[in-house]
Amino acid sequence: MAESKTIYIVGFAIIAIMVIAVLAYGSSQDWEFGGADDGAEGVVEEVDPGYEPWTNGIWGDYELPGETESMLFALQAAIGAIIIGYFIGRYTLKKSE
Amino acid sequence: MHIMEGFLDPLWCAVWFIIAIPFVAFGAKKIMELVREHPEHKMTVALAGAFIFLLSSLKLPSVTGSSSHPTGTGFSAALYGVCVTSFLATIVLIFQALLLAHGGLTTLGANICSMGIIGPMVGVLVWRLMIKGGAGFAISLAITALIADWFTYVVTAFQMTLNHGQSVDAFINFLTNYAATQIPLSIVEGILFFMFGVYLVRNKPEIFDISDAVAKKMQEA
């Protein structure tokens, strides 16, 4: 199955190059790469001036520490990756039997 | 595509919840039936959910100078359709709203509608068309995932416009923020699912048999 291996390598390489190219160009432009979800706040200010969010949710004004937030995102990715890895392992094993 | 807590008026929060609830409830029912009738699919549903978990946590930089994340709903949409996807997306969105203060509980209905329902719905249409037209599983899965991802952000822009601005200009503004940023990310998602599709075709092609579109195609053949 050399052919599918090539597809995986090329696929991951394209993604890596895309991300690096965007970051490299962004750094030359001093882009900050803020989240688009947070960016919506700026658009709301522009198209609907004076809008005040009517609730801050269960955490209120408290912002999760950046360290904790990145831990929780990593945890989320890990849960997904463990399950996907388990399946790929299982399928590959079954196939080779 | 996570609309933040407090950024939709209570009326719109309610509207999107009312639209979302039947899909999610039906999805939960469908998953229970699926697990009862096809026990081997218990694991595959978990796998479809795992993709949503993994991909929606990966924040990637985009050419617009902001960051966003893929949605990972394409695999679930292709195999199990919209309702199951909406249920799986709901689990992820609740996790993110409660633990990550990402999205929100009041905006949960709106976020389920974009990421779990309307985006995947367009994905399912693409999937059916491609399978019907005789396209391979891997490329069909890739395009389905790409479209479901991208359209999710178009829906978010539309939801925000309905609440804020209600004009074409406002819509374009929101589209620029959400959907333009998402173009390269949805391409990344498409590439990932193409690779996974290639893997499945080589190692476990029968997994696709559960899809309505594939079953129909096989009957015709």
Image: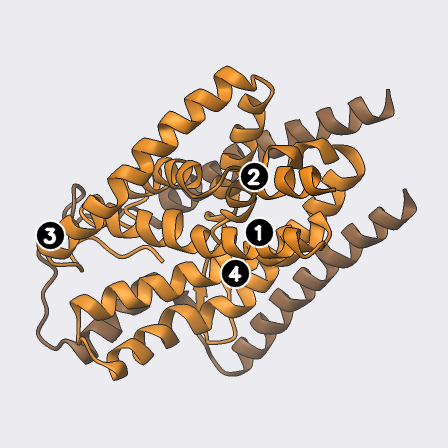
Q: Which residue is mark 4?
A: B147
Nearer to me, B38 or B111: B38
Q: Is residue B192 visible?
A: no
Q: Judging from the image, what secondary structure is the residue with disc 1 in?
A: helix
Q: Which residue is depicted at the point 23% across and 70% down? A: B161
Residue B98 % position (x, y): 27, 38
Q: Could you tell me the amino acid type at mark 2?
A: Asp
Q: Which residue is mark 1?
A: B128
Residue B2 % position (x, y): 32, 55
| Numbered mark located on residue A55 in the image | 3
Per the model, the C-alpha gap separating discs 1 and 4 is 13 Å
Chain B, chosen colour in render: orange
Q: Identify by letter the chain in brown.
A: A
Q: Could you tell me the amino acid type at mark 1?
A: Arg
Per the model, the C-alpha gap separating discs 1 and 3 is 41 Å
Q: Which residue is depicted at the point 36% across and 50% down? A: A66
Per the model, the C-alpha gap separating discs 3 and 4 is 32 Å
User: Which residue is outermost to the right?
Assistant: A2
Mark closer to the observer (1, 3): 1
Circle 1/circle 2 CB separation < 8 Å = yes
